[in-house]
């Protein structure tokens, strides 16, 4: 579920089910029942909302009240305590913010992350039978993991932002484990790593090209209006 949908669902559930705990509502809104994963998704949502506000030029504190609820450590409290904040006015504000954000990015289509994930799933099975040591296997599993996590994040923040973050993380992993990766002797595994990196890099390049196109087109439209 995308960020806007989660926020709106929170507001709706707060009005309908005041007797439930905030924790129950958060789990339902995020469709996530593992506590650690839920915490990560809550943090991701807050980070993305701040990014959206910055992108549209809104004040940093525009969504402070709702983000404080999402990030609160005391999630056992009843939802009725948050009804005054998660009201219809807040819901309309959320819709307005994300409508502005979508309008700003209307010339920037989402790039599909699924193809990268499919390659990684296939790669995971190849790792098990590859002629590599345990340290190398664990390193490659880490690379696969961040790709699959990016897929999960894309459901909240969109594929473009997820791929952009993934590209940075992938490069970071190469810096951390470069020696381990370079010592891999299995040519099939090395080729697959290069292929995955190339796919991520290519996707990110497309995103940047689309963003440049959007920015240039916006400038042209501004000048001609």
Image (cartoon, rainbow, N blue to C red):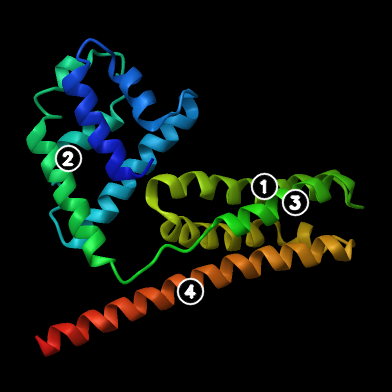
Q: Is residue 40 left or right of residue 2?
A: right
Q: Residue at x 25, y 13 (%)?
A: 77
| SS at mark 4 in the image | helix
Disc 4/disc 2 C-alpha distance (Å): 33 Å
Secondary structure beneath disc 2? helix
Q: CA distance from mark 4 to mark 3?
A: 24 Å
Task: Answer left or right for 6 relative to 193.
Answer: left
Quadrant position of residue 92: top left
**Measuring 26% from the left and 32% from the top, which residue is drawn there?**
9
Which one is in front, 57 or 28?
28
Q: Quadrant of the C terminus?
A: bottom left
Q: Nearer the viewer, residue 195 or 50?
A: 195
Mark 3: few/some/many CA within 10 Å (<14, 14-19, 20+) = few
Q: Which residue is mark 2?
A: 64
Residue 142's disc is: 1
Q: Is label 1 or label 4 in front?
A: 4
Q: Earlier in the sequence, mark 4 or mark 3?
A: 3
Q: Which residue is mark 3?
A: 122
Q: Secondary structure at mark 3?
A: helix
Task: Give neighbour class at mark 1: few <14, some 14-19, many 20+ (Cα, 10 Å).
Answer: some
Q: Considering only order in the chain, which callout, 2 or 3, is on the residue closer to the N terminus?
A: 2
- The residue wearing badge 4 is 206
Q: Mark 4, residues whose alpha carbon is within 10 Å: few (<14), some, or many (≥20)? A: some
* Residue 167 seen in the current view: yes
How many angstroms separate mark 3 from mark 2 (CA)? Answer: 42 Å
Residue 216 in picture, x, y percent from top left? 28, 83
Q: Say whether disc 4 or disc 2 marks the residue closer to the N-terminus.
A: 2
């Amino acid at each position: 579920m995308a960020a806007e949908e989660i926020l709106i669902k929170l507001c709706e559930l707060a009005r309908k089910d005041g007797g439930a705990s905030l924790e129950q509502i958060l789990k339902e809104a995020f469709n996530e029942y593992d506590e650690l994963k839920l915490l990560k998704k809550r943090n991701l949502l807050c980070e993305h909302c701040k990014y959206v506000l910055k992108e549209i030029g809104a004040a940093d504190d525009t969504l402070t009240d709702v983000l404080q609820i999402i990030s609160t450590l005391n999630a056992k409290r009843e939802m009725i305590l948050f009804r005054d904040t998660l009201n219809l006015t807040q819901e309309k504000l959320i819709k307005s913010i994300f409508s502005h954000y979508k309008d700003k990015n209307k010339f920037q289509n989402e790039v599909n992350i699924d193809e990268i994930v499919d390659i990684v799933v296939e790669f995971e099975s190849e790792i098990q039978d590859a002629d590599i040591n345990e340290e190398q296997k664990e390193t490659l599993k880490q690379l696969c993991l961040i790709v699959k996590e990016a897929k999960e994040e894309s459901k909240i923040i969109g594929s473009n932002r997820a791929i952009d973050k993934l590209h940075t993380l992938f490069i970071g992993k190469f810096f951390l484990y470069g020696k381990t990766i370079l010592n891999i002797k299995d040519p099939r595994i090395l080729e697959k790593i290069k292929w995955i990196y190339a796919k991520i890099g290519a996707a990110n390049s497309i995103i940047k090209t689309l963003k440049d196109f959007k920015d240039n087109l916006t400038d042209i439209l501004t000048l001609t209006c």
